[in-house]
Image (cartoon, grey):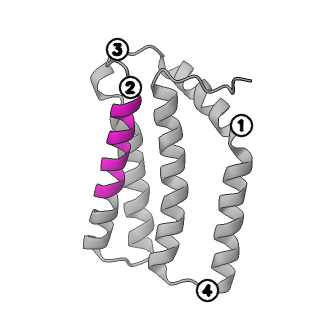
């Protein structure tokens, strides 16, 4: 399980992207390209941040760290959602809706990757 800890955020991101894209009637080629590029981005972030393949945190500790990440980034996420809602009211086509929601999904996936890796989430003053 320790070697495959990156599979969870990648699979969740791909699954949510594909479900959202299919509900918006986006072509499968566009969905696969978006899922592929976001998966590659998440793998690169994981490889740069991960110091070893040994699991230093249990699943409960990882989820607690992810809750802490969500607490620290709640204002950024609210701004992303507010921008997305304003753009929805102005009228967007389905590809832009998928793109903006995908930014929000990948932001949270990278936050989960930060929680998997041995990265200190607290600000140092």
Q: Which residue is mark 2?
A: 50
Give the mark nearer the N terminus: 1 vs 3: 3
Quarter assignment of residue 20: bottom left
- Could you classify mark 2 by the number of other residues whose Cα lies within 10 Å: few (under 14), some (14-19), or many (20 or more)? some
Kindly report the distance in space between the C-alpha atoms of the residues bearing marks 1 and 2. 23 Å
Give the mark nearer the N terminus: 4 vs 3: 3
Query: In the figure, 21 relative to 39: above or below?
Result: below
Does the magenta portion include 91? no
Q: Is residue 1 visible?
A: no
Give the mark nearer the N terminus: 1 vs 2: 2
Give the mark nearer the N terminus: 1 vs 4: 1
Q: Which residue is mark 4?
A: 91
Kindly report the distance in space between the C-alpha atoms of the residues bearing marks 1 and 3. 26 Å
Q: Which residue is mark 1?
A: 71
- Could you classify mark 3 by the number of other residues whose Cα lies within 10 Å: few (under 14), some (14-19), or many (20 or more)? few
Q: Which residue is mark 3?
A: 54
Camera-near label (2 vs 3) is 2
Kindly report the distance in space between the C-alpha atoms of the residues bearing marks 2 and 3. 10 Å
């Amino acid at each position: 399980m320790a070697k495959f800890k990156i599979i969870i955020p990648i699979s969740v991101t791909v699954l949510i992207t594909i479900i959202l894209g299919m509900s918006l009637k986006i072509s499968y080629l566009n969905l696969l390209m978006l899922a592929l590029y976001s998966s590659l981005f998440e793998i690169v972030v994981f490889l740069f941040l991960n110091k070893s393949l040994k699991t230093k945190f249990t699943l409960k500790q990882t989820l607690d760290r992810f809750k802490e990440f969500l607490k620290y980034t709640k204002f950024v996420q609210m701004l992303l959602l507010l921008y997305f809602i304003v753009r929805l009211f102005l009228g967007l086509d389905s590809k832009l809706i998928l793109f903006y929601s995908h930014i929000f999904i990948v932001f949270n996936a990278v936050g989960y990757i930060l929680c998997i890796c041995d990265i200190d989430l607290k600000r140092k003053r």
